[in-house]
Image: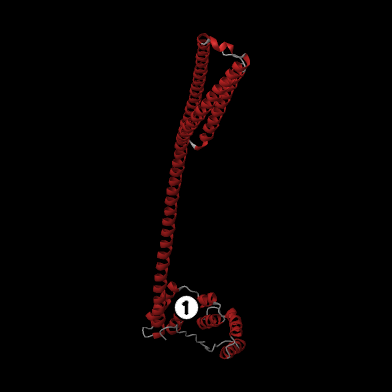
Amino acid sequence: MKNAFVFSLLFMGVPILASMRTEWEYSQAIRCAQDEQWADVQHRLSNLMIDDSDNPELLYDSGVAAYRVKEYQKAEAYFHQTTRNERATSALKEKAYFNLGNTKVALNSLDEAIDPYEAALAIDPNDERARHNLEQVRELLKQQEQQQDQQNKDQQSKQDQSVSAEASSDKQQSSSDGQQEQNDSNDKQDGRQEKQEQQQKNGKEGQKGESTTEECKEQGADKQQEGERKDNANDKSNDKRRDQEQEQCGDSHDSSPQKNSESDDERQARDSDAHHTKEGDESQEMQAGELDEQEGTEDIQAKQQKELEEELAPQDRWMARVLQQRERADEKANKRIVKATIDKELAGKDGQNCW
């Protein structure tokens, strides 16, 4: 009995001394109550209440019938009127208070059930049923209070967690935004620095390429001038050698008059052979010298080209190669022109006398 409420819904069934009709109606209500036909009981008692609405026994029995059919608000009203009725006995009021407390429990108004149970105990302190139900109500109220406190704590904890999560999210978002701004600023600064470095690098490479081009042009001009000086020197040497030969031929003509008797054909043939032999030797010597000079020049040029290519950037090396090839072609063309000129001059003297 400690874990459940005790109910005492006793139908009084007190005989009512009234008219025959009233007595018969009440006897029918008692019989229906014994058969637990509470809807019929409630109907018959409501008919009786028309003529005697202030009867405490009818009020109490109507409360019991309403409680049985789970019309708790009606039952509460009937039991409450019974406790206030001056005609009700103390025993009837004690039962009405007890059942009023049970009705409050059925309506889930636990805090309102305490007063009716305490009123029942005030009338009958030995009513263990009222004491038991009162303890059960207080225990339920204590549990509800604890549950409510726990729910409040949980709700407060959730709210605190939500606020903390929002604050953390805001802080994280702020930190993320700040970090993003810092990254963007760093990226822009790095981009500007790379752009400046690239511009400086391009400027240096352009200056270096221009300087290398100018040096190549100067070297080509110097080599061309050197070739022209060599060609001029060779021309002067050849002219000097021919002048010496002519002088030698004149001296020989003056010192040896007896050779005049030789036939003109033989002398011309001999002179022509000697002239051709000398020219052939000179031509071979010049060709050998030219070959040596050409090989030496090509070695120097190859070495210079290699050094220049090592100093230049990869994208500028092809320009240096083109300039070198062009200089070589110009130098060879100049040499061919000079050689053709010399051969033409020499060819004009074939078959002629030295003097």
Q: Which image quarter: residue 335? A: top right
Compared with 191, 25 (above or below) is: below
Please tell me how crowded label 1 is: few (under 14), some (14-19), or many (20+) other residues with Cα within 10 Å. Answer: many
The quadrant the N terminus occupies is bottom left
Amino acid type at mark 1: Leu
Compared with 79, 257 (above or below) is: above
- The residue nearer to you, when weighing 227 against 95, is 227
| Residue 349 appears in the picture as rendered | no
- Coordinates of residue 300 in the picture (x, y in percent): 46, 31
Residue 173 is left or right of residue 70, and the answer is: left
* Helix, strand or loop for disc 1: helix
Compared with 176, 240 (above or below) is: above
- Coordinates of residue 57 in the picture (x, y in percent): 51, 83
- Residue located at (52% from left, 8% from top): 254
Q: Which residue is mark 1?
A: 100
- The residue nearer to you, when weighing 61 against 57, is 61
